[in-house]
Image (spheres, grey):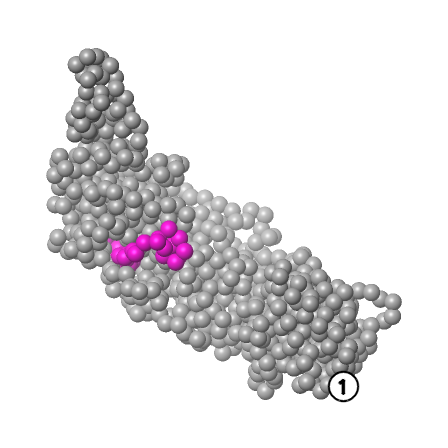
């Protein structure tokens, strides 16, 4: 950059000399060719690829549109003779835009023209240039202020640009524009405060939803039965036999297409040689020939899968059910790298320590015990006796023994090699193969995952062992290109998610057998047995509900996005939630033999979690109407983004992905700024409403991803959630309201009738903004959403009034 900076100074000197020697009344086209092009390309470091000339929108053509990489600056070119002078004696570069427009009528027209182009295309910066003068301003503001009430940066001559080149460069070079230096210069770093959210006026927000004793007991027992007990030794095998679900076809409830799910992992290897294979998980021979062939190549077998898709269950099923005969004739080590012990220990130390511990606890082998050590190194001890120390054997047996112990001590001291020798010794002696599972590496950082891969590679290469390593797909992809895997020719096998509806049904049927006593459990207190009866009833009700109604399973299927752990967590949250009167529907079911859980009760339990009010960090449900700027139409930016991606209005790159650049261009064309889009992109990715082609965690200010696509989570939000009163009732406390009158009326209320009225006010507020923004109407169906929302509210109001009349 330093070299480029110096070169640009010299180029500006040359341009200034050229201009002083060739002053002329150039027309606009010649001014652009001879002066403006050179100023930005040769003197400010922009490339021609960054600039689009005469870019059209409708029937309007902008002279210069600059990209970095989004459209970020529009320059309106004027002919050389259209110039402006500043008041004598003023020596600064920042001036009132209003005064410039007042004092220079020809400049006023150009500023209004550039500002109009910027506002219609969502481009934040506008500028006027005649080749030897430059005035720039913020054309699209998100603080509620008119651009014409702001300031402008002005350079009145090439000589001034040269004298103050550091400022000139720091404001108008490509990196300066990318870094928003012009905004910092004219507005400072302090962002204006948004209108307060309702949550700011609630003193106990977000609060804690208290559970009664019944709900607390039910929560504890549900965690015990659905998750904890299934991990115990006695139950593990029957649990796997009854509950394991192989990777299957997409559930009918999912809102992403089957083609996208099928290519879920293949797409990660776009343009990579050889797509990963899917492991057959129900083969009669357990470990398939493909896996054996891979292990024989002295490489670890990489199992790819997102967090929660079932890699651990696949491994356990392989060990205890699918390949039980092979594992009975194997020395196998299962190492949980996500355990607390692993997290608190250096990974290089933990893996060998854990293997040594399992040799002792499971196989009864202490690799530091005297006879074991002598057995492992028996052949080397024989050679030792024939070495230079052989004479001591007869002359000084005691000294020979000391030397022999020192020899063995050195062997044991080299812990890694001693462990390898020990495992190989027992493998040969017992005639058993060695199998090592390194699981839950995907719960650790990318750096540790790569370190684990190198360790697994070393074990595979140096031990007579088959090594299974579980990784996240995105880590594997990045590492193939630039990390630890880049030096290895590696093949991966993928674990795609099972059908969530089948997993939940099998898990709950198994839990029902536990709570009913069909599968006996010992050592249970009488109080727990009583709670088992209650939980058994809740499970029966839940199973009947998801069998007869699709709404709840559809919600779980789409929000969990293939994550089995999350799906189970959502169900457990409901069973013990303080937002659900579980005791009431147990009583109804006991009396009538039937009860169907209403969708709104399940939804409330999941949306609020343990909080009394909606708090975004505590829930998997996202407020899609939140904003980052003072632009009211940003309420609709998130749903517009998701809908735009879902309808593939853009340059598709396959498998549902859309080029991010085309998304920015489309959103900017309807008036959203790059900064607004940056914020919503990051939030949508972090909340898993969209996913990037690279699938790395986004950071504001970092390079934007190449391609993105909606997830089932995102599509469920715009197709279903935002059309429900329960959702609107929750998220409105987290949404800034720009209309002062509406904001005063939207208050913290508790009764259902008042909440229905409050939600109607909020919906009408959003509709009023929608009506003002004609350009966004074709990108999201707010009118249809609003209609369904009000229909839901009307239906609830009817039910509530009916209940009130009945009680009266």
17 vs 528, nearest the viewer? 17
411 vs 230, nearest the viewer? 411
Q: Where does the magenta region start and end?
A: 478-507
Please say whether residue 637 is one of the residues in the magenta stretch.
Answer: no
Q: Is residue 556 left or right of residue 463?
A: right
Residue 16 is situated, as x and y percent measured from the top left of the image, at 74, 73
The local secondary structure at tag 1 comes to loop
Residue assigned mark 1: 25
| Above or below for 695 versus 373 | below
Residue lying at 28% horizontally and 61% vertically, measured from the top left:
276
| Above or below for 576 versus 645 | above
Residue 5 is situated, as x and y percent measured from the top left of the image, at 65, 63
Residue, far right: 89
Residue 581: in sight, yes or no?
A: no
Please say whether residue 495 is one of the residues in the magenta stretch.
Answer: yes
Residue lying at 69% horizontally and 82% vertically, measured from the top left:
31
Q: Is residue 198 left or right of residue 704?
A: right
Residue lying at 47% horizontally and 64% vertically, measured from the top left:
705
Residue 282 is situated, as x and y percent measured from the top left of the image, at 17, 56
């Amino acid at each position: 950059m330093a070299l480029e900076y110096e070169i640009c100074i010299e180029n500006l000197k040359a341009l200034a000399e050229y201009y002083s020697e060739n002053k002329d009344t150039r027309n606009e086209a010649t001014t652009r060719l001879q002066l403006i092009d050179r100023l930005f390309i040769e003197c400010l470091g922009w490339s021609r690829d960054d600039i689009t000339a005469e870019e059209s929108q409708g029937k309007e053509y902008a002279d210069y549109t600059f990209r970095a990489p989004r459209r970020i600056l529009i320059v309106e070119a004027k002919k050389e003779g259209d110039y402006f002078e500043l008041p004598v004696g003023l020596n600064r570069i920042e001036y009132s835009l209003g005064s410039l427009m007042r004092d220079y009528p020809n400049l006023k027209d150009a500023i209004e023209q550039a500002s109009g182009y910027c506002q219609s295309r969502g481009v934040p910066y506008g500028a006027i240039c005649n080749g030897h003068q430059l005035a720039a301003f913020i054309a699209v503001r998100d603080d509620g202020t008119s651009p014409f009430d702001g300031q402008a940066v002005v350079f009145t001559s090439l000589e001034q640009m040269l004298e103050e080149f550091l400022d000139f460069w720091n404001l108008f070079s490509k990196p300066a524009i990318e870094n928003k230096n012009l905004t910092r210069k004219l507005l400072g770093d302090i962002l204006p405060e948004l209108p307060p959210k309702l949550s700011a006026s609630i003193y106990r927000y977000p609060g804690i939803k208290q559970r009664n004793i019944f709900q607390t007991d039910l929560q504890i027992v549900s965690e015990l039965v659905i998750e904890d007990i299934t991990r115990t030794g006695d139950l593990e095998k029957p649990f796997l036999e009854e509950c394991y679900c192989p990777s299957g076809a997409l559930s009918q409830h999912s809102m992403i297409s089957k083609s996208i799910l099928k290519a879920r992992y293949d797409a990660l290897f776009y343009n990579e040689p050889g797509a990963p294979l899917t492991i057959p998980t129900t083969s009669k021979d357990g470990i398939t020939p493909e896996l054996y062939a891979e292990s024989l190549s002295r490489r670890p077998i990489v199992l790819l899968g997102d967090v929660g898709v079932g890699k651990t269950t696949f491994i356990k099923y392989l060990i205890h059910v699918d390949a039980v005969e092979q594992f009975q004739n194997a020395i196998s080590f299962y190492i949980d790298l996500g355990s607390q012990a692993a997290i608190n220990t250096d990974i290089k130390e933990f893996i060998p320590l854990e293997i040594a511990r399992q040799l002792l606890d499971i196989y009864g082998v202490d690799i530091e015990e005297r006879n074991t050590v002598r057995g492992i190194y028996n052949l080397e001890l024989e050679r030792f006796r024939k070495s230079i120390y052989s004479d001591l054997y007869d002359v000084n047996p005691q000294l020979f023994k000391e030397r022999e112990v020192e020899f063995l001590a050195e062997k044991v001291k080299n812990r890694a090699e001693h462990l390898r020798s020990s495992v190989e010794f027992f493998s040969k002696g017992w005639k058993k193969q060695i199998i090592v599972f390194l699981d839950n590496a995907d719960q650790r950082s990318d750096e540790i995952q790569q370190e684990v891969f190198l360790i697994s590679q070393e074990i595979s290469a140096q031990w007579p062992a088959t090594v299974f390593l579980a990784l996240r797909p995105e880590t594997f992809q990045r590492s193939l290109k630039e990390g630890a895997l880049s030096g290895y020719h590696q093949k991966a096998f993928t674990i795609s998610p099972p059908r969530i509806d089948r997993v939940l049904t099998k898990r709950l049927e198994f839990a029902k057998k536990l709570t009913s006593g069909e599968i006996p459990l010992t050592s249970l207190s009488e109080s727990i047995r009583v709670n088992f009866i209650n939980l058994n009833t809740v499970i029966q009700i839940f199973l009947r509900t998801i069998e007869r109604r699709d709404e709840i399973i559809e919600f779980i299927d789409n929000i969990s996005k293939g994550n089995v752990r999350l799906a189970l967590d959502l169900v457990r949250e409901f069973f013990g939630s303080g937002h659900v009167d579980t005791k009431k529907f147990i009583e109804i079911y006991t009396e009538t033999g039937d009860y169907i859980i209403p969708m709104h009760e399940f939804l409330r339990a999941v949306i609020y979690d343990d909080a009394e009010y909606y708090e975004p960090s505590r829930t998997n449900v996202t407020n899609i109407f939140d904003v980052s700027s003072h632009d009211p139409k940003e309420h609709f930016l998130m749903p517009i983004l998701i809908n735009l991606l879902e309808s593939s209005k853009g340059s598709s790159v396959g498998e549902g992905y859309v080029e991010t650049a085309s998304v920015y261009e489309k959103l900017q064309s309807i008036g959203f700024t790059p900064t607004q889009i940056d914020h919503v992109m990051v939030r949508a990715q972090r909340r898993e409403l969209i996913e990037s082609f690279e699938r790395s965690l986004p950071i504001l200010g970092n390079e934007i991803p190449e391609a993105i696509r909606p997830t089932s989570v995102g599509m469920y939000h715009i197709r279903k959630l935002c059309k429900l009163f329960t959702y609107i009732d929750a998220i409105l406390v987290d949404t800034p309201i720009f209309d002062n009158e509406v904001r005063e009326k939207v208050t913290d209320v508790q009764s259902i009738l008042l909440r229905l009225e409050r939600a109607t006010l909020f919906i009408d507020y959003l509709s009023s903004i929608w009506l003002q923004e004609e350009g966004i109407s074709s990108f999201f169906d707010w009118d249809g959403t609003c209609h369904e929302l009000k229909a839901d509210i009307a239906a609830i109001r009817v039910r509530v009034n009916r209940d009130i009349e009945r009680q009266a």
